[in-house]
Image (cartoon, rainbow, N blue to C red):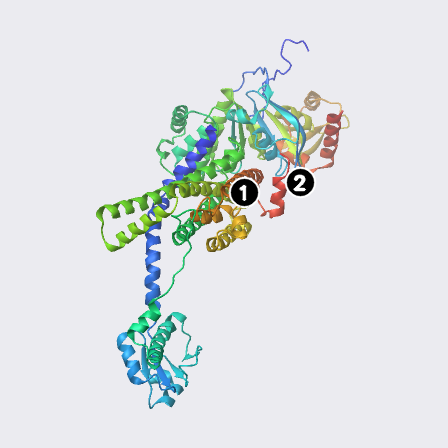
Amino acid sequence: MCSLLPASFNWPNFSSQSKRIGKFVPQIKTMPLLELQNLKKYFATQKAVDDISLTVEKGQIFGLLGPNGAGKTTLIRMITGIFYPDEGQIIFDGKKFDPTNDVAHIGYMPEERGLYKKMKIGEQTLYLAQLKGLSKNDALKKIKQWFIRFEMESWWNKKVEDLSKGMSQKLQFVTTVLHDPKLIILDEPFSGLDPVNSNLIKDEIFNLAKNGATIIFSTHRMEQVEEICDHIVLVNKGNKILDGTVKEIKQEFKENLFSIGTEQIPTMNGNAPFEIVGTKNESQIVRIKEGNKPNDVLQYLLQQGTAIHSFNEILPSLNDIFIKLVEGTPAARQFLQKESFGQKV
Amino acid sequence: MQKIWLIIKREYLTRVRKKTFIISTLLFPILYIALVFGMGYIAEKSRQNLHVAIIDSSGYFTEDVLNKQNSIDKSSNLTYIKDSVARVIADHKAAGYDGYILIPAINWQSGKTDSLLFKADKSYGSSSTAVVEAKLNRIWDEIKNEKLGIDAEKRKILTESRISLSSRNIKDETANAKTAEGIAFACGILIYMILLIYGSQVMMGVMEEKTNRIAEVIVSSVKPFQMMLGKILGIGLVALTQFFLWIAFVLIVYNVGKATGGGGMANAMVGNMQQMFSSVNVPLILFCFGFYFLAGFFFYASLYGAIGSAVNEDMREAQSLSFPITMLVIISIALMSTAIANPTSPVAVWASIIPFSSPIVMMARIPFGVPNTVPWWQLGLSMALLILGFIFTVWFAGKIYRTGILMYGKKPSWKEMLKWAFRKN
């Protein structure tokens, strides 16, 4: 491939749905940080991860989605070196993943938060940082920075059991990112947080990504995914069933639905390039017929002399796509077949 | 290695700094002394003074004789019943007696034991009746001596001229079976306590990490095996610290006692200890104690750690799963008493060589003398096997630990845990 742009050039995400700001600079990815190649992990009773391959680019915020029991945690545990894959391999930062040394470059916040309840917060943070390989002095310096940033300076001699749930979540986040990991894996980072702290953590996630960290964000809360992630992968029953940017995926699952705000209900005749499927908030929900473009709709309406004050494409929310795929509707089944067939060829 | 060191440090410091550690370290010797003296005191106190009615048909246990004995020995008063026999038998309580003894027409020449009964409305222990029995026997002896014409001098010859026999090891002149028994018992019990107390501390520590869910955070930084080993070594050091503090306590008491030459009790203790130190090989015992204490601790603590990793927060689950292991420790203690009674019997020899019981049983044999009671080959074999044993249990436990620490839900059975251990990866 010889093009002016590298093959992996990733166009910025200008999706109208995206509320994200401050990440308009297109990032040129030189090398993926993490590559999973045909990973398999079977337990006695189930195939927890059954042949999953995926690529996480440097600096990406990568959404790992899936219902409970889909195999997300098993996948993450292999990436963090807790489990060995039965088959397949992991490439971390260009080299074969070596758990003993590479874990120092990974920060992992499990869904089930855990800290020593009776240990003083300062000591505990220091301990966890040293376990990641930081020297005592470096660790102390970093702890100080983060504690000031999160307004936690006064907590040093408190115990975790004295903290509220939100406070211990913040502490857990700090212990996860303190050693400047290249890869940060956050499993449901917002569960149990109030909106203020949620935003604090969210901003921090963007900040870390901006500074070069790669983030894998595991959740089943779709609205957060749309807001935060560059790229998503959906897993279900140990299989990857979806892989792409949020925009790509939405395009793929769109149903040619538009919402048209008009003065009066448009008159329909046989030539109309669309059909009305419903109304919502005084707007018509229409589906464009096969072979027509949005412009054809506008043209038709203009010819009719209809006054238009809004015209929006309705893209399916990730939530809809998620539910559709996971619940196994006929369409989803078809999609799954197509996908798995395609993979095996 | 760096990481294991960090874990050891955390495990050690968080425990040693705890108030409970300081208090238990100080309190244990005090409680131990209190227990030893307290038991004697309670035994003395709990012996009841009985008020016994004697109904005599033999004609030997007369009122005069009984009164004479009562004046010599004030405990348990014996009263001769003359007129109110029927009343006492009908209701001894109302008559003011704890019970009564019917003495039949016994014959001093019979040359056999006459069994009498102390009849009372409730049961009395042998420590209470022993006093009465001794009193009756003194009277009976006096009567027999008188009948046989044995005067005080002849009686002294009869009772005092005796032969006493104790064993002496001709290869090891300093060996003293009585002292050895005491030391053996103390060593065995100490190791037993350390295995159970600190073993269960390892189990609780692992359970705490699992229920706090910090385990997953830690294993994303270190290998589960390092995590387990760090915990075992850290807690082992705590046990060692406590043990050294106790030794220091004993030495201080010994030296202070020796220097001041103070009170009777201190003197007695110093004397006992001097005798003890001179009759056994103290450095060897200390070395072996250190070895069996640590190796035994690794052997059992790793198994307890494996169980802690397999169960959830439920204490009952942990207890039922750790029962077989606790059983091994208790069997060892049972074997220990056999070994102390007969340190060269085959049971004692084998129990002191087989790894699970060797920490306790071998420690109970060593004070009897190496190499005469315990040949060097036995000691060497026992140590080698115990090292192999704990390497195996640590490896085995590490396998279970790795799976168990991240497994939530149903309590696994021993069968499932064995599967975890022998699964590849």
**Residue A91: % across, % down:** 61, 22
Which of the labelled discs sits on residue B19, or is there none? Answer: none
Query: Looking at the image, is mark 1 or mark 2 nearer the viewer?
Result: 1
- Which chain letter goes with mark 1? B
Q: Please tell me which residue lies in front, B359 or A46.
A: B359
Q: Is residue B330 left or right of residue B74?
A: right
- Callout 1–callout 2 Cβ contact below 8 Å: no
Q: Quadrant of the C terminus of chain B?
A: top right
- Position of B3 relative to B153 (above/below): above
Label 2 SS: loop
Which of the labelled discs sits on residue A44, or is there none? Answer: 2
Residue, far right: A270
Which of the labelled discs sits on residue B306, or is there none? Answer: 1
- Which chain letter goes with mark 2? A
Q: What residue type is disc 1 on? A: Ala
* Cα gap from disc 1 to disc 2, whole angstroms: 20 Å
Q: What residue type is disc 2 on? A: Ala
Q: Quadrant of residue B391?
A: top right
Q: Please tell me which residue lies in front, A302 or B197.
A: B197
User: Mark 1 packing: few (<14 Cα in 10 Å), some, or many (20+)?
Assistant: many
User: Mark 2 packing: few (<14 Cα in 10 Å), some, or many (20+)?
Assistant: few
How many discs appear? 2
Q: Is residue B347 left or right of residue B149?
A: right
